[in-house]
Image (tube, coloured by chain):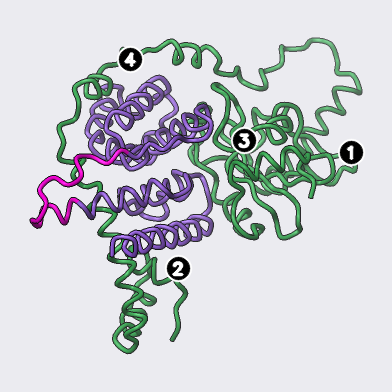
Chain colours: A green, B purple
Amino acid sequence: MSFSDETLMAFADGELDDITKHEVELAMRLDPQLAARVRQHQALRSNVFNAFAPTLDEAVPQRLQAAARSGKVVHLNTVRAARNVPPPLVTAPAPRKRSWTWLEWGAMAATLVAGVFGGIIGSQAFSGNGAMVGIDNDGGSLVARGELANSLSQQLASAAPPGAAVRIGVSFVSKDGVYCRSFTLPNTGGLACRDSSVWRIPVMAATEGGGGEYRQAGSSMPAAVLEAVDARITGKALDANAERNARQQGWKR
Amino acid sequence: MTSHTTLHADIAALLPRLRRFARSLTFNRDDGDDLVQGALERALGHSGQYQAGTRLDSWMFRIIKNAWIDEIRSRGRREQMFAPEEAGAHVGDDFAEAHQQRLAIQKAMSLLSEDHRIVIALVLVDGLPYKEAADVLEIPMGTLTSRLARAREALQGLLSDQARTVA
């Protein structure tokens, strides 16, 4: 039986399920070359671990202990960032006494459509992020608008400005040959793919445990979005340079 | 709900691992500790963003990783930061051999791309499970495993080159 290098690596990292693990162990007994490849992965793992292990035995510097234990580590940048935390994206509308105009009914209908789309993938996905997502003129799909559209076009992954509501996760070329980028909004994660001049959003879902708190520093991508990325990605994710080039080309390929 | 005091104590307990992670990115004691200190400030300044019940270590690693990427980007092209410590000390005993091997690994890691170095630091230096490492990097599992495989290959290649040069 032959195993991919990734499987042998996962074996060395203790990441295989019991059945595959057993198969690899069996194959190692029968195939000395395969056994040697596994040993190389194991040796690299233990050598790299050992190279940095002594750090654990060092005394933690006082300044770090103090920083961790004190609640008063407040630097100017922190204060600034806190001040820039974006306000809730949609505030509750003021109570209205007069009857609604047709325009408002239209807006409500659009919200309901968004709600239906959102319901497919996560009922919480749209609450609070309405200004950033819209229905395409064709009526068929969701597109990024406003700050989300700007961030998708301009922001490099992991380089969100302090206090930004939108964070870009991973950028890649999809099997359809277009650029796609994963993103998180407060309580929501999604995937956007470039289609001529707009970002279409095939998947958007509530982040796990999203409960109305801003959590961009530690937000995690919903599983539905990660699966959508896995299903679409070809090759590897873009690095910072490739992202910059793609941005320069207006995300056209 | 995790109280602030508990969160602080929990973060303090993670400090040795956080320092090791930072060291494996910066290779320098002071740079690594600066990175950790900056990350502590970010974390405690935004402690409301930590979701009780999720892994605190992953959250802190993600903050350190983001702080490091910001640092590198603001610095422009990363200058060569690898500073071998007292190489040649204790020549001729087992300690020296182990020490030389550690230096060789650190040197090779310093030559990796940032993406590769970070994934090696999470999985091989810290020993995080793939799922947690993918969570820290905010990438899917498939991307994590292929990135890790390429990073290992690159690291192994660099170490083999070193071995050839020495021999």
Q: Which residues are magenta?
A: B83-99
Q: Chain of mark 1?
A: A
The front one of B83 and A44 is B83
- Indicate which disc residue A137 carries: 1
Q: The residue under label 1 is which amino acid type?
A: Asn
Q: Chain of mark 2?
A: A
Badge 1 and badge 3 in a common chain? yes
Label 4 and label 1: CA atoms lie apart by: 49 Å
User: What residue does disc 4 label?
Assistant: A73
Image depth: mark 1 or mark 2 in front = 2
- Indicate which disc residue A156 carries: 3
How packed mark 2 is, by other alpha carbons closer than 10 Å (few <14, some 14-19, many 20 or more), is some
Label 1 and label 2: CA atoms lie apart by: 44 Å
- Indicate which disc residue A6 carries: 2
Q: The residue under label 2 is which amino acid type?
A: Glu
Label 4 and label 2: CA atoms lie apart by: 43 Å
Q: Residue at x 36, y 80 (%)?
A: A34
- Going from N to C along the chain, the mark reached first, 4 or 2, is 2
- Going from N to C along the chain, the mark reached first, 3 or 4, is 4
Give how far across and how far down residue A145 sits, in percent: 76, 31
Image depth: mark 1 or mark 3 in front = 3
- Going from N to C along the chain, the mark reached first, 3 or 2, is 2
